[in-house]
Amino acid sequence: MSRRRTQRIAPLSGGRRRRRPIQLVATVVLLLAPLAVALAAYLAFASDDAGGGAGGGLPIAAHTPPVPHRSEAEPRYRGKPVPGIDLKGVDAFHLPLRKPPRAGLVFDVDSGDVLWRHDPERVLPMASLTKIMTALIVVDRTRPSEPVRITQAALDYQGSGVGLLPKGKRVRAEALLNGLLIVSGNDAAIALAVHVSGTEHRFAALMNQRARRWGLTCTHFVSSHGLEPGNRSCARDLAVLTRLAMSKPRIRRIVRLSQAELKFPIKGGKLYLSGHNPLIRAGYPGTIGLKTGYTEAAGRCFVGVVRRAGHRLGVVLLNSPDPAKQGEKLLDAAFAATG
């Protein structure tokens, strides 16, 4: 009898005796309890940020309701509403053009008020106006002095380029940003894209992610430079990008220049750049930006920004027969209308 009692109180000893179901369940519960507690703590405190990155997540209570996607109703950039362009108002002036651009817009850069429009939501190729988005991502993701290694991908460019990028060497990000915006260097665009995202394909995906987040419904990117017709947008979206770009000191300092002299790891140690902005070249008073573009599919494209008497006005022209003349006429009329 005593031996049987010993077997009952020592269930872990050997023998053929089977456990009762109730004892088995109790044992399993005791073994799994610590794991359940750990799992609950992890779920309570882990971050579920789709943007990725270990750490940085704040504790989230289990009962917290899901946060709605704000980008669908209110596009935001760094916690603030994206500066918009309101097409609901009435134009401040009318200017008949003998041969108008395929699309165009004149707007107040500070307020977003539209002063003149011509098919502002028509989706068209935008050529190197693509580089406005490229520049915005670069200034967000790099420091001016950050070294950028020049890979073979940047040397395999087509179209316009800085042309002197030294393979295998490292160039300051700010020098490449100058090459991107002043001479519209496709090689500079590729070098910066690869530096930021690893490949240009990934960088284009990041550009499209930004476009969706900012409510740019006309806009799509397939490259960082815009040589392909798959890079498309509309005058309204490009006006939004212009407002964002002109809020960035690094971009503002560059796009107002007609020429630049930069330290560069080449023979002589200097790189000389000369800009393409037709309003700057024509000496149009108050011009402070921004970007030109041309391909056979897109035609001549231009975004210009001019500051006079406390007003900053922008003009977007897509497939214009003469961006310089049309830009001047439209801006003259716009400044006259704004007093």
Image (cartoon, rainbow, N blue to C red):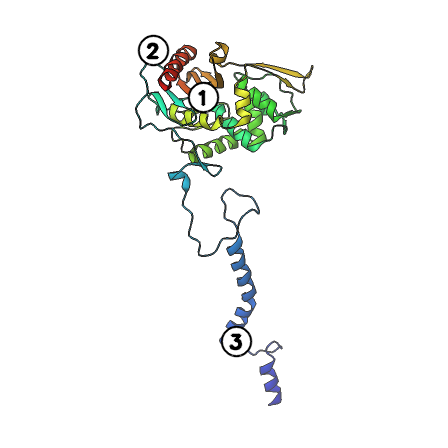
**Front in this rendered view, residue 179 or 76:** 76
Asked whether disc 2 touches disc 3, contact meaning CB atoms under 8 Å apart, the reply is no
Q: Amino acid at mark 2?
A: Lys
**Front in this rendered view, residue 236 or 124:** 236
**Front in this rendered view, residue 108 or 186:** 108
Give me the residue at 59% from left, 30% from top: 195
Question: Which residue corresponds to mark 3?
Answer: 23
Secondary structure state at the residue bearing disc 1: loop
The image position of residue 107, as x and y in percent, is 39, 22
> Is residue 156 in view?
no
Secondary structure state at the residue bearing disc 3: helix
Q: Quadrant of residue 71?
A: top left
Question: Which residue corresponds to mark 1?
Answer: 310
The image position of residue 7, as x and y in percent, is 60, 82
Give me the residue at 44% from left, 56% from top: 63
Question: Which residue corresponds to mark 2?
Answer: 99
Q: Earlier in the sequence, mark 2 or mark 3?
A: 3
Q: Earlier in the sequence, mark 2 or mark 1?
A: 2
